[in-house]
Image: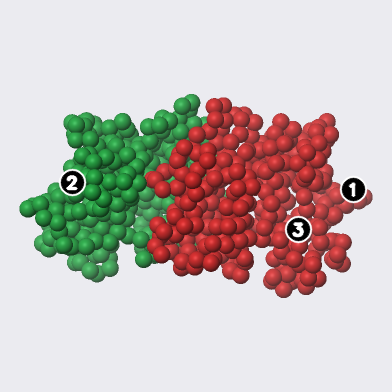
Chain colours: A red, B green
Amino acid sequence: MGEFDLIARYFTRPVRRSPLGVGDDCALLQPRPGMQLAVSTDLLLEGRHFLSTVDPRRLGHKALAVNLSDLAACGAQPLAFTLAIALPRIDEPWLADFSEGLLALADRHDCELVGGDTTRGPLAINITVFGEVPAGQALLRSGAQAGDDVWVSGTLGDARLALEAFRGTFSLPQEVFEAARLRLEQPQARVALGLALRGIASAAIDLSDGLLGDLGHVLDRSGVGATLEAERVLPLLAAAPAMKLATPAVLELVLAGGDDYELAFTAAAARRAEVEAAARQTGTPVTRIGHIDGTRGLRVHDAQGQPLAQRFAGFDHFL
Amino acid sequence: MGEFDLIARYFTRPVRRSPLGVGDDCALLQPRPGMQLAVSTDLLLEGRHFLSTVDPRRLGHKALAVNLSDLAACGAQPLAFTLAIALPRIDEPWLADFSEGLLALADRHDCELVGGDTTRGPLAINITVFGEVPAGQALLRSGAQAGDDVWVSGTLGDARLALEAFRGTFSLPQEVFEAARLRLEQPQARVALGLALRGIASAAIDLSDGLLGDLGHVLDRSGVGATLEAERVLPLLAAAPAMKLATPAVLELVLAGGDDYELAFTAAAARRAEVEAAARQTGTPVTRIGHIDGTRGLRVHDAQGQPLAQRFAGFDHFL
C-alpha cells in the first residue's frame, strides 16, 4: 500500500458542505456571508503529547478534540479540518482504529476532513481546524473586566492524575484510574457550551496547560488580575472523593495539571443566571471559582480569605 | 526562554488584514464576499524533506513556498498561514534565521502568519496556508479534456539533481551545483502565474513528487490520458547544457525528479496565445510539452513519435 491508497482508504470521504475536499492541491471552504473563519492548529508528538501505548481510536479522537476545544473557546461552530500525519510505517489495523476514532468525533460535530498531508516519519499528528463565528462575536482572551466572575466547565486535574499514575507517582484504585485515563486520552471539547456563551462570556480560553497558566493568558491580554477561592477549586478534581490526597497535591493537580480541555471563562456578575442557563441547556457542569479584579496577578485565597503560599507552574514545552 | 517568549519574539507580528492573529485560542479570517477559502497543508521532516545542514533561512522559505505552490496550483491569492513547529531545543540564532526566511517570503506574497503551535521534539514543520479565490474559479485537477495542451512552468529536475549530488550520485561543477541547490532549497512558488491562469487553464497541479506522478493525478481526476514529447521535455533541465548527461538520466530527472514546485497545467489549444500572454505578464517561462488525449495513461514519445520504453516512478513516501 502506498501513500495515495492510504489516503483513499482511511482519510477520504465525500464532503457534505465544503465545495472541495481531499484530492486536489487545496481544499475549498465557503464561510457563509457575515461569518468569520476561526482557525486553530495543534501538533501532537508521540512520547510528548501521548504515550506510544495509547489506543489509536482514543488518539484519533484526542487529536481532533484538542483542536475543537480551541474552537469552543472562541465560540465557533466546527466546519472542517485538515490532517497532516507522519507515520513510522503503514500499519493497517492501527490506521483503521485511528481514523475510526478521529472520524467518529468529526461526525459528532459535523466537522469534515477536507485535506491533509501524509509522510513517513516518527509518529506526529498535526490537525488544523476551521470553524465559523458571526463577525465580531468570537469569544476572545482580551475581554475580562474587573468585577467579572471566573468560571470553569467540568472537572480539572484528573487527566494529570492519570498521567502521574502512568509515571508511577500515584497508585490509583482501578476504577479511579480508568475514569482519569479516559479524561487524559479522550477529552470532550466543550463546543456546545462555547456556542451558548457567545454574547454572555466576556472572555474565554481552553485549558490545555493548566488553569493558572491558561487563565494567566486571559489576565495578561485583558490587563486585569484575578482571585480564586481554594474551597471552590478543590472539589473540581473528580477523583478527590475516592482518594485521600493532601490539599496541596489536589491544588497542584487542579490548578496546574494540564490536558483538561475544559473552558475557563469570565462573565459579568449580573449574567450569572444566563451562564447557568447556558450550562443547563448544553448539559455542561460549570463552577464559579473566583472573580476578576483590577490588581494584576493571579491569587488563590483559602477559606479565611488569606493568600495561599503554595506556588504553581503552568506547563511550558520548553521549560 | 520559554515557549511563549519564543512565539512572541520570532513568530508574532501585528496582523494587517485578518481580524485576529497570533495570541488567542483561534485566529480569525474574513474572506471577502463571494470568495472561497483555499486551504493546503504540508508537513516537512528533517532527514526526509530537508537535510539537517540546510541554511535555516532557506528552510523557513521552503516551508512556506511548498504551501504557496499549492495555492498557485488552485489560482488562489495567498492570505494567511499557521505554523506548527517541533524544535529539539531553543536555538536563538537558528530561530532568527528561520523566521527571517519564512517571513521574508510571507511579506513578498502579503501572506500573514496568524497562529500556530510550538513544542519540543525532533525538528518538524507543518504550515497550513489560506488563500482566496472567487467562488467557482479555482483551478482544479479534474478539468483536463482531450485535445488540451499540456504545459509546465520553469525548469524541472534540477532540485533532484542537487539532491543526488548531496547523495554522491553525481559530481557537479560548483556553479551547476549552487544553481541546482537553490532550486532544491529555495523553490519559488508560481503564485502570479496561477492567478493569471484563472479562466484560461482547464486543470492545474503543482509539481512536488515528479511530473509523471503529479500529471498522473490530473489525468486520473479528469478521466483522460496524455502524450508528452521527449524533445520538448529534455531541455527542461536547466543544468543540462553544462553537463554531459545521458538522455535516460535527464528524462528521469525531469519526469520523476520531484521537489520542483513548478505548475503543470492544461489549456485548450485555442488558448495558446492567452497562456503565453499570462506567462509574459508574470515573467514566468512556460513550455508546451504535449497534449491530452482520450486514451487513458501517460505516454512519452521520442522525436519519431515512438513510445519510449523507459519506465519512471513518481515519488511516494511509503514505497
Q: Are circles 2 and 3 on residues that touch, CB within 8 Å?
A: no
Question: Residues under labels 2 and 1: Cα distance?
Answer: 79 Å
Of A265 and A285, nearer the camera is A285
Of A257 and A106, nearer the camera is A106
Quadrant of residue B78 in the image? top left
Q: Residue furthest left?
A: B304
Chain to which mark 1 belongs: A
Q: Residue at x 34, y 42 (%)?
A: B142
Q: Is residue A116 visible?
A: yes
Q: Residues within 10 Å of mark 3 (few under 14, many from 20)?
A: many
Please give the residue where the numbered disc 2 appears in the rendered image.
B289
From the image, which quarter does the N terminus of chain A lie in? bottom left
Q: Residue at x 61, y 30 (%)?
A: A134
Image side of residue B48 versus residue A88, left or right: left
Residue A115, percent from left and from top: 47, 48
- Name which residue type carries label 1: Gly
Quadrant of residue B212 in the image? bottom left
Q: Residue at x 78, y 53 (%)?
A: A155
Q: Are circles 1 and 3 on residues that touch, CB within 8 Å?
A: no
Please give the residue where the numbered disc 1 appears in the rendered image.
A305
Question: Residues under labels 2 and 3: Cα distance?
Answer: 62 Å
Image side of residue B93 versus residue A188, left or right: left
On residue A157, the disc is 3
Mark 2 or 1: in front is 2
Of B123 and A271, nearer the camera is A271
- Name which residue type carries label 3: Gly
Chain to which mark 2 belongs: B
